[in-house]
Image: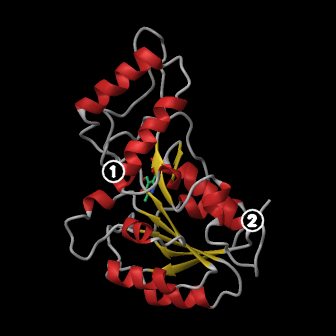
């Protein structure tokens, strides 16, 4: 059961509930569906259909090395539960990001983990605050949980209005989930890391931040951009960072099931 202390988020609690420390949300899914001779060939958009720009798929596809590894894994181990290899993978990914394995959580698409965050925040009676426009999955899940959602319009230059978001967040009496997609989808704008880190470092315990960094790899050369992983490495435990294999790694279709949510 969750304990509500002063009606605020217990900083480590979300993580504990899910068996981790501060979290990086990776994505891994096995898809043992057959292409050949099975009649299970599904209507993909690979060549014929128009490119759906708002899907932000990687049109180059996944790396040939990753493809080979996936094919071999399915051939050799598709019938085995993946516990052991998953632990090995988790350790490698943790080492790569310089965090502890217990700080990682995985979902069927990062959207599944966004859903877990929404459920956690709803159990705390939190209000969710986010820019408008932004990627809508978290909003959909929060609304499905009957949470209040406050949207703060971006500026004329599409910049996320951190000043107003901050004001809105501190005006709340209870817990607040702050959703910042950085770089933002669909605007592509980044939030300057100094501004963002300053807010996160000085926020009250009632704030939990979700940094959805689905596109972080595309912003790394920008000197004004930094992943929130730096904060996690510093020991901050008031944020969750979401990454995905769907974009830069070209694995959006490597999943079974899909999130469906009206927003
Ligand atoms: C900002 C953002 N977060 C998350 C996702 C969903 O990613 P996943 O495929 O990991 O569920 C998308 C997909 O478009 C996205 O744009």
Q: Position of residue 4 (x, y in %)?
A: 77, 73
Please state the horizontal and vertical placement of residue 119, each as a whole percent of the image: 68, 59
Residue displayed at 24% across by 64% down: 220
Q: Identify the residue at image location x=67%, y=78%.
A: 175
Image quarter in which the C terminus is found:
bottom right
Q: Is residue 143 left or right of residue 167?
A: right
The verdict on label 1 being within 8 Å of ligand 1 is no
Residue picked out by circle 2 = 123
Q: Residue furthest top?
A: 37
Front-lying residue, 167 or 238: 238
Residue 165 visible somewhere in the drawing:
yes
Residue 131 vs 2, above or below: the answer is below
The answer to whether 131 appears left or right of 20 in the picture is left
- The image quarter in which residue 216 lies: bottom left
Q: Is residue 34 visible?
A: no
CA–CA distance in space, label 2 to label 1: 33 Å
Percent from the top left, x then y, of residue 241? 46, 62
Left or right relative to 115: residue 61: left
Q: Secondary structure at mark 2?
A: helix
Residue that label 1 marks: 96
Task: Please rate how many residues cluster around mark 2, counting C-alpha atoms within 10 Å: few if below 14, some from 14 to 19, many from 20.
Answer: few
Colouring style: secondary structure
Please name the residue shown 58% across and 64% down the image.
Answer: 139
* Residue appearing at x 43%, y 44% in the figure: 91
Q: Determine the image quadrant of residue 144.
A: bottom right
Give percent across and percent down for residue 46. Answer: 32, 32
In this rendered view, identify the residue nearer to me: 84 or 226.
84
């Amino acid at each position: 059961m969750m304990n509500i202390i002063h009606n605020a988020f217990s900083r480590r609690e979300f993580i504990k509930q899910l068996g981790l420390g501060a979290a990086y949300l990776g994505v891994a899914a096995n898809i043992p569906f057959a292409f050949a001779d099975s009649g299970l060939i599904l209507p993909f958009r690979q060549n014929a259909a128009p490119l759906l720009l708002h899907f932000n798929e990687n049109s180059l596809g996944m790396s040939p090395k990753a493809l080979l590894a996936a094919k071999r894994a399915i051939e050799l181990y598709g019938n085995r539960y993946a516990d052991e290899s998953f632990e090995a993978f988790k350790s490698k990914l943790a080492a790569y990001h310089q965090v502890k394995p217990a700080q990682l959580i995985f979902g069927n698409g990062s959207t599944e983990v966004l859903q877990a965050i929404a459920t956690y925040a709803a159990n705390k009676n939190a209000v969710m605050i986010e820019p408008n426009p932004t990627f809508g999955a978290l909003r959909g899940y929060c609304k499905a949980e009957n949470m209040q959602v406050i949207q703060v319009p971006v500026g004329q230059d599409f910049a996320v209005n951190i000043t107003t978001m901050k004001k809105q967040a501190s005006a709340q009496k209870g817990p607040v989930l702050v959703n910042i997609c950085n770089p933002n989808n669909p605007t592509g704008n980044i939030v300057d890391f100094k501004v963002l880190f300053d807010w996160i470092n000085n926020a009250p315990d009632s704030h939990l931040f979700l940094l959805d960094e689905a596109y972080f790899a595309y912003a790394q050369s920008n000197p004004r951009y930094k992943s929130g992983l730096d904060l996690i490495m510093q020991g901050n435990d008031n944020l969750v960072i979401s990454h995905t294999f769907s974009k830069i790694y070209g694995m959006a279709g490597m999943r079974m099931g899909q999130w469906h949510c009206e927003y």
